[in-house]
Amino acid sequence: MNSKIKVLIGSDTADCGMAWAGALKGAGMYAITRRCDGNAVLSSIKSEAPDVAVLEAKMPFCDAVEVIRRLKMEKKYCPNVLIVSGSDDPRLERDAINAGAAGVMVKPIDPQYLVSRVERLCTPCGDEPEAVPDETDLECAVTEIIHQVGIPAHIKGYHYLRTAIMLSVNNDEMINCITKLLYPTVAKRYQTTSSRVERAIRHAIEIAWDRGDIDVLTRIFSYTVHTTKGKPTNSEFIALIADHLRLKFKQKGAVPAYSQR
């Protein structure tokens, strides 16, 4: 399937467009980049007819939503469009969905998460059930949030935290018994100790608070982070994200799945 997927990316920057294209090509897709220019992107969509277009929300001459509207108004071929925004903007999301966009993603975006989104968009409806997202769906959602918060993927706490959140989304008891149940479960999976899991997660949260953008937490979770209050505890941080994801999946009428093996 992947070899047949053509993706047009409306960005040619090294940190975004080229990185995303590299990941898509690594997954066997055909990816092309264009400069962040509404008119250039519009012209390329008409000539290239990609399956998916990944566009910056704001572009010179013509923004992403307007690109979709023009294609439909001219009755031209319109691909699945994923819009990339620098912030969580409810109005943009509303306008994008109303115009016909496939979705809105907030930077920073994990290239592998983008690959997963593109693959799902290009999967025929009969090939994959839509009612219940599988483990990959939940993992992608957790990964996107962790990246947005600002936790680097190379530290151990990143992986421990991601697993802890995924476990907690499906089982409230995990976060209620964090020392007796959650840490041991994560530790067993990574063949380490509960104390090391706790310390690594704590370190990851400290990095997010010291180096990350606190405004991202506020935008994603509608949660005001008071700097005078200090950093959240491990359980507070995990519970906050788990509750956010649980609500997100509930609104979609789906139940996230994750194995506790």
Image (cartoon, grey):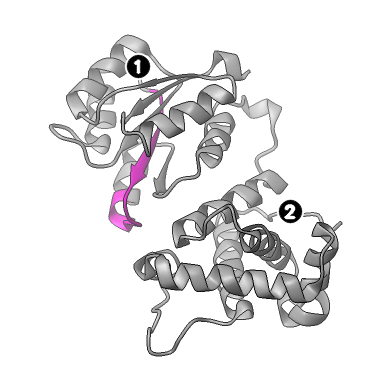
Amino acid carrying mark 1 in the image: Tyr
Stretch of the chain drawn in magenta:
79-92
Outermost residue toward the left?
Answer: 61
The N terminus appears in which quarter of the rendering?
top right
Q: Is residue 171 above or below residue 61?
A: below
Please identify the quarter of the rendering in which residue 52 is found: top left
Q: Is residue 136 left or right of residue 65?
A: right
| Residue bearing the label numbered 1 | 77
Within 10 Å of disc 1 (Cα), the crowding (few <14, some 14-19, many 20+) is some
Q: In the image shown, does 67 or 254 lie closer to the viewer?
A: 67
Which of pointers 1 and 2 indicates the residue nearer the eye?
A: 2
What percent of the width, then of the height, locates residue 249? 59, 57
Q: Residue furthest top?
A: 47
Q: As drawn, is 128 to the left or to the right of 155? A: right
Q: CA distance from mark 1 to mark 2?
A: 36 Å
Q: Quadrant of residue 72?
A: top left
Q: Position of residue 235 (x, y in %)?
A: 64, 79
Residue marked by disc 2: 257
Taking 100 as reference, is 174 left or right? right
Q: Position of residue 181 (x, y in %)?
A: 82, 75
Residue 240 in view, yes or no:
yes
Q: Amino acid at mark 2?
A: Ala
Q: Which mark is residue 94?
A: none
